[in-house]
Image (cartoon, rainbow, N blue to C red):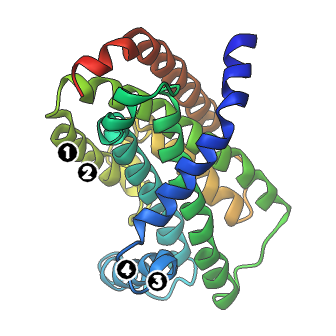
Amino acid sequence: MKKHFSNFKKYRFLLGELVKKGVTLKYRHSYLGILWTLIEPLLTMIVLTIVFGSLLHRSNDPTFPIYILSGRLMYSFFSNSTKVSMKSIRSHSSMIKKVYVPKYMYPLSSVLSDYITFLISLIVLVGVAIVLNVRPTLYLFEAIIPLIMLPVMCYGIGLILATFSVFFRDLEYIWSVALMLIMYTSAIFYPVERIIDNGYGWLLEINPLYNVIVNFRNAIFGQPLDMRALKLSALFSIGFLIFGLIIFYKKQDEFILHV
């Protein structure tokens, strides 16, 4: 453990450079640049609020836009970070072949660079909450817990995807389908009660992302943490991380033969 920690300290500068590169490259050819990080979720929220607010008869509910935006922001980070992490080893193949760098740095930098973008996008959530007069409570401090669990979960899943995608390139298409299923079972734009009342509540419990989203929303709306969702999200986050680290370290020496 001491060896790995000292190795991490040795390459922490490189990790910082990789994170900077990930953030800057994302908006390199964009006129709006990082401003799009604020505009895109706002526009998406408006469209989803108009469409689903009308369908679900919640157009007059001032909290519905925040309900949608909070779920959408967390899903966007989950989706983007795992997709970039999955490609991180192959996209740095030239560097891997030339110099030694701890390979876990590549998926880690992918998650961290997207996490920075995600934290910036939370400015939109704060702004919308102020406009709609959703007042913060002491429960808001509990949002730190899901905000820590989410990147840990994404890194664990990213390690798993990065490992398997080196050997199975079609995983990229399979994960796109999986992300669509995760999105529709994360209750981003519909009330949770509709799923539970129809007997499909188990779909929410087995969805690792939903268990993080529900407590993030509870913190925003001044409600205590859902302890069952907290335990499940902790289990998923730690479980994915441990499994991801084990499988990544077992297979990392074979990467150079396949990238």
For the residues marked 1 and 4, what is the alpha-carbon distance in whole angstroms?
Answer: 27 Å
- State yes or no: discs 3 and 4 in contact (Cβ < 8 Å): no
Q: Which amino acid does label 1 sit on?
A: Val
Q: Earlier in the sequence, mark 3 or mark 2?
A: 3
The residue that disc 2 covers is: 180
The residue located at (49%, 65%) in the rendering is 24
Q: Which of marks 1 and 3 is nearer the N terminus?
A: 3
The residue located at (56%, 57%) in the rendering is 20
The residue that disc 4 covers is: 30
For residue 241, the mark is none
User: In the image, is 79 to the left or to the right of 67?
Assistant: left
- State yes or no: discs 2 and 1 in contact (Cβ < 8 Å): yes
Q: What residue type is labelled 3?
A: Ile
In the rendered view, would you say 255 is above or below 36?
Answer: above
Q: What element does badge 2 sit on?
A: helix
Q: Quadrant of the C terminus?
A: top left
For the residues marked 3 and 4, what is the alpha-carbon distance in whole angstroms?
Answer: 13 Å
- State yes or no: discs 1 and 4 in contact (Cβ < 8 Å): no
For the residues marked 2 and 4, what is the alpha-carbon distance in whole angstroms?
Answer: 26 Å
Q: Which amino acid does label 2 sit on?
A: Met
Q: What element does badge 4 sit on?
A: loop
Q: What element does badge 3 sit on?
A: helix
For the residues marked 1 and 3, what is the alpha-carbon distance in whole angstroms?
Answer: 26 Å
Q: Residues within 10 Å of mark 3 (few under 14, many from 20)?
A: some
Residue 79 image offset from top left, x and y in percent:
38, 51
Q: Which of marks 1 and 4 is nearer the N terminus?
A: 4
The residue located at (18%, 38%) in the rendering is 174
